[in-house]
Image (cartoon, rainbow, N blue to C red):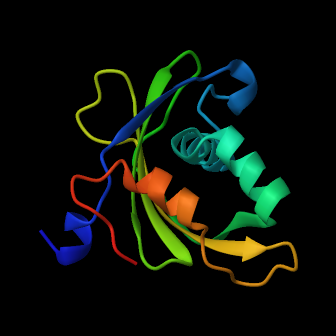
Amino acid sequence: MSSKQEKFSATFHFPVQIYYEDTDFSGVVYHPNFLKYFERAREHVIGADNLAQLWHQEGLGFAVYRSDMLCHEGVEFADIIDVRTRFYFESKYRTIWQQEIWRPNGKKPAVTAHIEMVCMNKARQLSPMSGPLIAKLSQSFDQPISL
């Protein structure tokens, strides 16, 4: 294992029902929708209340800095997928997210993504994450996090 892999959080699971509106004419998920599913899963990890409080009280939010996604196989209408999410702190400014979409009874992930998020203030300037947010997210690690 590389040192960065040793820093990963626990794995979070987020189920998503695939609706007909998510698919193209062939019943396969239209690829930009995978980014939505990954976004929802990250929001689930951080917590919508935490994100709202962070924005309204501290003027901080997250932006995608980089996103790499690979589609290994199709995901189809009526599937209930499992979005698996792990992350680590690159610094007090940046988090790195490894996310996978698994189909029911899948032997390998159908879609994988590496997403880098940065913390920014309302002026869209890079800003460190707040102490309370780091503390909350650090609860999903086996060992204490120092930034």
- Of residues 146 and 7, which is closer to you in this image? 146
Q: Is residue 110 left or right of residue 126?
A: left
In the rendering, at what x and y percent does residue 75 appear?
50, 32
Q: Is residue 24 left or right of residue 124?
A: left
Indicate whether 38 appears above or below 104: below
In the rendering, at what x and y percent does residue 99 appear?
43, 51
In the rendering, at what x and y percent does residue 88 appear?
38, 64
Residue furthest to the right in view is 123
- Of residues 63 and 32, which is closer to you in this image? 63
Q: What residue is drawn where x is 75% and y is 66%?
A: 60
- Of residues 121 and 3, which is closer to you in this image? 121
Indicate whether 14 appears above or below 40: above
Q: What residue is drawn where x is 26% and y is 73%?
A: 4
Which quadrant of the rendered structure holds the N terminus?
bottom left
Which quadrant of the rendered structure holds the C terminus?
bottom left
Residue furthest to the bottom in view is 125
**Residue 71 visible at all:** no
Indicate whether 51 appears above or below 120: above
Q: Quadrant of residue 103?
A: top left
In the rendering, at what x and y percent does residue 122 appear?
86, 72
Q: How many marks?
A: 0
- Of residues 13 and 106, which is closer to you in this image? 13
Q: What residue is drawn where x is 30% and y is 46%?
A: 10
**Residue 129 visible at all:** yes
Q: Quadrant of residue 96?
A: bottom left
Q: What residue is drawn where x is 78% and y is 74%?
A: 121
Residue furthest to the left in view is 1
